[in-house]
Every structure is written in C-alpha cells, then in structure tokens.
Image (spheres, helix red, strand yellow):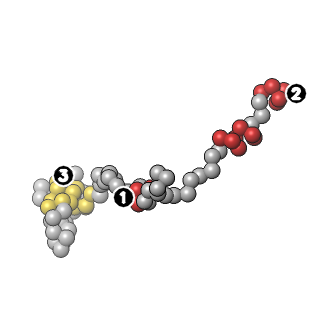
Amino acid sequence: MPTYAYACKNCGHRFDAVQSFADAALTECPECGGALRKQYGSIGVTFNGSGFYRTDSRKATASGDSGGASAPSSTSSSSETKASPAAAGS
C-alpha cells in the first residue's frame, strides 16, 4: 500500500498516512481539525541494469559492433574546415 504525505492548511502539521488506492483522501487534520492537502514530491527512480539505454537492446554482430549504424567520424571533416593560425593571418 502506498504512503501519502499530508499537510494541514491551518496549523502546518505534516504527517504520512498508509492508505489503499481505494481509500478516500484524508480531509481533516488530526491535530487541529483543519483542512488537509496532499503533498506531492519527486520519486526516487534510477534506471540501472540492461534494457534502459538505447544500445542495450541491440544485439552484437560478429565483428563486435554494437549492431547500430555508426556515426560518421567528425575528426577528418573538422580538420579540413579549420584554418591554421598561420594561414588565417595571410
């Protein structure tokens, strides 16, 4: 069963309640009887292990390749487009 966090709008009392999905949300503060609101926070999810990355689902080929299309090398094209400092001054 999930745990829900609540906060009182009147007195600021904060607490957690373990409730079923079918249970109605709490509406009354146990401290002062004021109105409650649910608190929403981030959840701690980490993706570890195989199957979570794009390359994990691809089968390796006989040549040891990851199976995907390889990106063209940018080293040869970047060296051709860059001018040397000596050539730029002339």
Callout 3: SS: loop
Circle 1 residue: 51
Residue type marked 2 = Ser
| Label ID, residue 72 | none
Q: Residue at x 75, y 40 (%)?
A: 81
| Left or right of 62 on screen, residue 73 | right
Circle 3 residue: 13
Residue 28 position in % (x across, y down)? 16, 64
Q: Farthest left residue?
A: 30
| Within-10-Å neighbours for mark 3: few <14, some 14–19, many 20+ | some
Q: Could you tell which of marks 2 and 3 lies nearer the N-terminus?
A: 3
Residue 76 position in % (x across, y down)? 69, 41
Callout 2: SS: loop
Quick one: 43 or 4, which is closer to the camera? 43
Q: Is residue 21 above or below residue 62?
A: below
Residue 41 position in % (x across, y down)? 30, 54
Separation of disc 2 and disc 3 at Cα?
74 Å
Q: Farthest right residue?
A: 90
Callout 1: SS: loop
Residue 45 position in % (x across, y down)? 31, 54
Q: Is residue 46 above or below residue 81?
A: below
Residue type marked 1 = Gly
Q: Is residue 35 above or below residue 45?
A: below
Q: Could you tell which of marks 1 and 2 lies nearer the N-terminus?
A: 1
Answer with the quarter of the image where residue 35 lies: bottom left
Quadrant into which the N terminus falls: bottom left
Check contact, mark 2 vs mark 3: CB within 8 A.
Answer: no
Separation of disc 1 and disc 2 at Cα?
54 Å
Q: Is residue 5 visible?
A: yes
Q: Residue at x 65, y 41 (%)?
A: 75
Residue type marked 3 = His
Q: Could you tell which of marks 3 and 1 lies nearer the N-terminus?
A: 3
